[in-house]
Image (cartoon, rainbow, N blue to C red):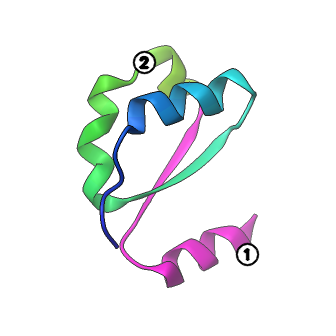
Amino acid sequence: MLPVGGVKEKVLAAHSIGIKTIILPKWNQKDLEDIPKKVQKDIKFYFVESMLDVLKIAIEK
């Protein structure tokens, strides 16, 4: 799974409309340092390595 760009902007936009769960590639975990702590506390982040990981998270919810 490849990293995505613009994580900060995407997360802030998601937070502004009330999204509480975000799944990102494991490569993007370092991008959390750019996101305000308040936003980090409001959102549950999952970092995945494969599409199978995404499916497991989606099915559990």
Quadrant placement of the C terminus = bottom right
As drawn, is 17 to the left or to the right of 8? Answer: right
Q: Quadrant of residue 6?
A: top left
Q: In the rendered view, would you say 61 is above or below 42?
A: below
Secondary structure under badge 1?
helix
For badge 2, the amino acid type reads: Lys
User: Where residue 53 sits in the image (x, y, percent)?
Assistant: 50, 76
The residue that appears at 27% across and 28% down in the rendered structure is 33
Task: Report the span colored magenta.
Answer: 43-61
From the top left corner, tell me how far across and down residue 21 is, in percent: 64, 46
Q: Secondary structure at mark 2?
A: helix
Q: Residue at left 46%, top 28%?
A: 9
Picture disc at residue 37: 2
Q: Earlier in the sequence, mark 1 or mark 2?
A: 2
Q: Is residue 24 left or right of residue 14?
A: left
Classed neighbour count for the residue bearing mark 1: other residues with Cα under 10 Å, few (<14), some (14–19), many (≥20) = few
In the shown orientation, is residue 54 left or right of residue 34?
A: right
Residue located 36% across and 53% down the image? 4
In the image: residue 1, left or right of residue 41: left
- Does 61 appear above or below 43? below
**Above-or-below relation of 59 to 21:** below
Please state the horizontal and vertical placement of residue 1, each as a whole percent of the image.
Answer: 34, 73
Query: In this figure, which residue is indicated by the disc labeled 1?
Result: 59
Tell me which amino acid carries mark 1.
Answer: Ile
Of 11 and 53, the residue lying toward us: 11
Mark 1 and 2 residues: CB-CB less than 8 Å, in contact?
A: no
Front-most of residues 47 and 13:
13
Residue 4 position (above or below residue 55)? above
